[in-house]
Image (cartoon, rainbow, N blue to C red):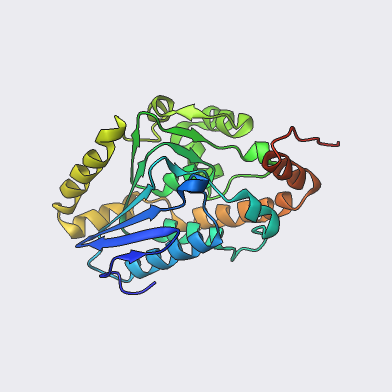
Amino acid sequence: MGRLEDCIITDLVRVKKTGALIEIVFNRPERRNALNNAMYDGITAVLEDAEADQSVRCILFAGAPGAFSAGNDLSEFISDPPVTDDAPVFRMLRALHGSSKILIAAVNGLAVGVGVTMLLHCDLVMASRDATFQLPFINLAIVPEAASSLLLPAMIGHQRAMELLLLGEAFDAGQAAAYGLVNGIYEPAELAPAVRATIVKILAKPPGALLAIKRLVRPTSAGVLERMAAENAALAGQIVSAEGVEAITALIEKRPPVFRG
């Protein structure tokens, strides 16, 4: 990706380093910031570079105006499905989990699929009042990723997690806050200033203590990585199954899916 001291601007991911802060902005507004393999590769490279840079203490994730992320690019799911453990999406999620930096997400609008599961690996999540969230994996006949089958029940309880995963319905910022998935809700125009103010407070704290707290609070890596691998294998099987192909194709074609028992 180049030196993090530079401001890196690509077509799909905008990255900027300012002192101890790195900002990663998903920049695909015409597709509501849906993530594709090129974007996953870019995000992974930034996370790996940041991990090796001791001056970095905080990483901010945001989406270009209009959405945080609509999740995985479904057309790419059909043309180049993630069926191996080294698929770009899985590599990015492992890098995200492995980051020792303070991870903050500013959710402006839509957050779907991986746009939600990646939040489970962030340390602070701040959302606009108009944000909506959805875990629609069941609607695509696939399973969730990012060890969310482990982390989500631990965070919000078994029944709530199953409701979100089995029904795959959208929920608003108020429900996300009630479940403890976001730290605060802000008017859309107030989200960016609130995030900036929070980052200023964090970066004023003693850096050694910040990273020590992150190490202690973060879930045990072995269990998370083991669950990620199990989910990846299950997702790989489902995405190329007859019902998986039908569910994703039907969504792209904007028609009801037809599942044959």
Left or right side of 254 for 102: left
Residue 116 position within the rendered picture, expressed as x and y whole percent measured from the top left: 48, 42
Left or right side of 212 for 242: right
Residue 250 position within the rendered picture, expressed as x and y whole percent measured from the top left: 73, 40
Image point 15% across, 56% down: which residue?
206
Q: Is residue 39 shown to the viewer in this render?
A: yes
Residue extending furthest toward the front: 30
Asked which quadrant contains residue 57, the reply is bottom left
Residue extending furthest toward the bottom: 2
Q: Is residue 186 shown to the viewer in this render?
A: no
Asked which quadrant contains residue 86, the reply is bottom right
Image point 62% across, 40% down: which residue?
137
Relative depth, front residue between 251 and 116: 251
Image point 34% across, 61% down: which residue?
15
Residue 117 position within the rendered picture, expressed as x and y whole percent measured from the top left: 49, 45
Left or right side of 231 for 3: left
**Quadrant location of the C terminus in the rendered image:** top right
Image point 56% across, 54% down: which residue?
228
**Quadrant location of the N terminus in the rendered image:** bottom left
Residue 221 position within the rendered picture, expressed as x and y whole percent measured from the top left: 45, 57
Left or right side of 240 for 205: left
As drawn, 197 above or below 221: above
As drawn, 250 above or below 55: above
Count of all numbered marks drawn on residues in the image: 0
